[in-house]
Image (cartoon, rainbow, N blue to C red):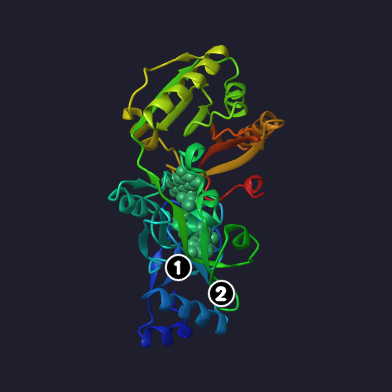
C-alpha cells in the first residue's frame, strides 16, 4: 500500500510522521474495509499538530478515522487511513476541583497509575485498560468492572474538550458533546476519588433465579461497586470504599441474595479474587484468522432481559457459534448483558450479528 502523496506535506513540515502498519490484533478492524489488515498511520507530533493534521485531511478530502488503542469492536473505522491520538497525552491533577485533566489519547491504565501515585483513583477498570484510551472509551461508551460505584466513563466525565467540524476547539458539557455530531475529543476532565481503604469480593452460588436476585439488589439501590452473574448462576459481588459503611452495605446485599436461595461460596476477601476477576476477562481470546470472536454488549430493561438473552443465544447457536454470557451492573432500570461469541472456522462477522 502506498502512503497517500497528500500526506507528504505534513511530513515535510515536521507536523506528523506517516507509516504503514498491520492493524490485526485484538479487534477485527481489518474486517471492516481494510485491505490485508494494513493501514496508514499518521502520527501528529503534538496537540497543535493533531489539529493541523485533521484540518489538512479535511481540506484535502482525505477520508480518515481516529484511532486510540484500536481495541474497539463496536465502532470500528471504515478507512485505511488512521490519525493516531497518541499525541493527545496531557495529564494534570486539579487538586482544588479534585479532577484529572487528561488528553484523549492517554490509555486508561496510564491515567489510573498517574492518579494512584497521588492517592486517588478514577475507578475505571476495563479489561482493555492497558491499551484503550480515554477518547476511545467515551466514544464506545465503555463500562469498567466497578461502574456500580464509579459510573461508566461517559457518566463520570464533567467536561469534554472538542475539536468541531469547523476546526474550533472548546470545552463543553458531556450533554453538549453528545449532541455535537462528529466532534473529536481532545481531552476531558474526570473526577478523582480517594483510593478505597478496603475492597471485598464475594461469590454466591445456587440462587434459583440469579438475575431476579440482581434486580432486587438494584431496586433496593444498594449499588455495589460490581455485581454480576454468569451463565452458571454464580453471582460475584464487589464492595469497596470505607470499610464500616461498605460492610453494612455488603451484609444487606448478602441477606437479599440468601433470601433468593444463594449461598456464599467463598469468605469475603480483600481482593485476592479481584485480580482473578480482572484476569478472567474473556474478551475475544481467539480473534485470529481461524476463529471469529466478538463481544456483544446490550442494555436490557428488567421487563425484557430474558427475552433479549434468549433471542441472542438462539441466534448464536443456530449459526453454530459458542456463546457465554454474563449480566453486569444492575440498576433499578435494567442490566447490561455481555455475550462473548466465538465462531470456529469463520473469518468475518456473520450477517446475523451485523445489527
Ligand atoms: C481485551 C479487551 C477487553 C475489553 N474490555 C472492555 C471492558 O472491560 N469494557 C468495555 O466497555 N469495553 C471493553 N473492550 C472494548 C474496547 O476496549 C473499548 O471499547 C475501548 O474503550 C476502546 O478504546 P480504544 O482507545 O481502543 O478505541 P479505538 O478502537 O481506538 O476507537 C474506537 C472508536 O472511537 C473513535 N475515537 C477514538 N479516539 C477518539 C477521539 N479522541 N475522538 C473521537 N473519536 C475517537 C475511533 O475512531 C473509533 O470509532 C475490550 C476490548 C478488548 C480487546
Q: Quadrant of residue 23?
A: bottom left
Camera sees residue 138:
yes
In the image, is residue 33 above or below residue 308? below
Looking at the rendered structure, the secondary structure element under dot 2 is loop
In the image, is residue 324 above or below residue 57? above
| Residue 117 coordinates in the image, percent (x, y) | 27, 50
| Residue 203 coordinates in the image, percent (x, y) | 43, 22
Callout 2 crowding tier (Cα within 10 Å): few <14, some 14–19, many ≥20: few
Which residue lies at the image location 31% right of the left edge and 46% below the top edge?
Answer: 119
Looking at the rendered structure, the secondary structure element under dot 1 is strand
Q: Which mark is residue 39?
A: 1
| Residue 325 coordinates in the image, percent (x, y) | 54, 32
Callout 1 crowding tier (Cα within 10 Å): few <14, some 14–19, many ≥20: many
Q: Which mark is residue 119?
A: none
Write down the residue under mark 2. Answer: 63
| Extreme-left residue of the structure | 117
Amino acid at each position: 500500500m502506498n502512503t497517500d502523496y497528500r500526506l507528504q506535506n505534513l511530513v515535510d513540515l515536521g507536523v506528523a510522521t506517516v507509516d504503514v502498519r498491520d492493524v490485526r490484533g485484538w479487534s477485527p478492524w481489518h474486517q471492516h474495509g481494510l485491505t490485508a489488515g494494513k493501514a496508514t498511520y499518521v502520527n501528529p507530533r503534538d496537540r497543535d499538530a493533531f489539529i493541523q493534521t485533521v484540518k489538512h485531511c479535511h481540506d484535502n478530502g482525505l477520508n480518515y478515522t481516529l484511532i486510540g488503542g484500536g481495541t474497539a469492536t463496536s465502532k470500528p473505522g471504515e478507512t485505511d487511513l488512521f490519525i493516531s491520538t497518541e499525541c493527545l497525552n496531557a495529564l494534570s491533577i486539579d487538586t482544588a476541583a479534585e479532577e484529572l485533566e487528561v488528553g484523549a489519547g492517554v490509555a486508561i491504565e496510564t491515567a489510573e497509575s498517574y492518579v494512584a501515585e497521588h492517592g486517588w483513583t478514577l475507578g475505571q477498570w476495563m479489561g482493555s485498560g492497558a491499551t484503550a484510551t480515554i477518547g476511545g472509551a467515551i466514544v464506545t461508551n465503555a463500562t469498567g468492572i466497578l461502574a456500580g460505584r464509579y459510573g461508566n466513563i461517559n457518566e463520570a466525565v464533567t467536561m469534554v474538550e472538542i475539536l468541531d467540524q469547523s476546526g474550533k476547539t472548546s470545552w463543553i458539557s458531556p450533554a453538549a458533546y453528545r449532541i455535537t455530531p462528529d466532534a473529536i475529543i481532545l481531552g476531558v476532565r474526570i473526577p478523582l476519588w480517594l483510593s478505597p481503604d478496603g475492597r471485598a469480593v464475594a461469590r454466591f452460588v445456587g440462587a434459583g433465579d440469579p438475575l431476579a436476585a440482581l434486580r432486587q439488589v438494584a431496586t433496593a439501590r444498594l449499588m455495589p461497586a460490581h455485581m454480576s452473574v454468569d451463565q452458571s448462576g454464580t453471582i460475584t459481588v464487589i464492595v469497596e470504599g470505607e470499610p464500616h459503611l461498605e460492610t453494612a452495605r455488603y451484609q444487606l446485599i448478602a441477606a437479599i441474595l440468601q433470601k433468593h436461595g444463594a449461598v456464599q461460596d467463598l469468605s469475603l476477601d480483600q481482593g485476592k479474587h479481584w485480580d482473578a476477576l480482572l484476569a478472567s476477562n474473556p474478551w475475544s481470546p481467539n480473534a485470529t484468522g481461524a476463529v471469529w470472536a466478538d463481544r456483544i454488549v446490550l442494555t436490557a430493561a428488567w421487563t425484557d432481559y430474558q427475552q433479549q438473552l434468549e433471542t441472542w443465544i438462539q441466534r448464536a447457536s443456530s449459526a453454530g457459534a459458542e456463546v457465554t454470557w454474563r449480566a453486569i451492573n444492575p440498576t433499578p432500570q435494567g442490566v447490561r448483558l455481555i455475550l462473548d461469541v466465538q465462531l470456529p472456522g469463520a473469518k468475518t462477522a456473520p450477517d446475523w450479528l451485523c445489527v
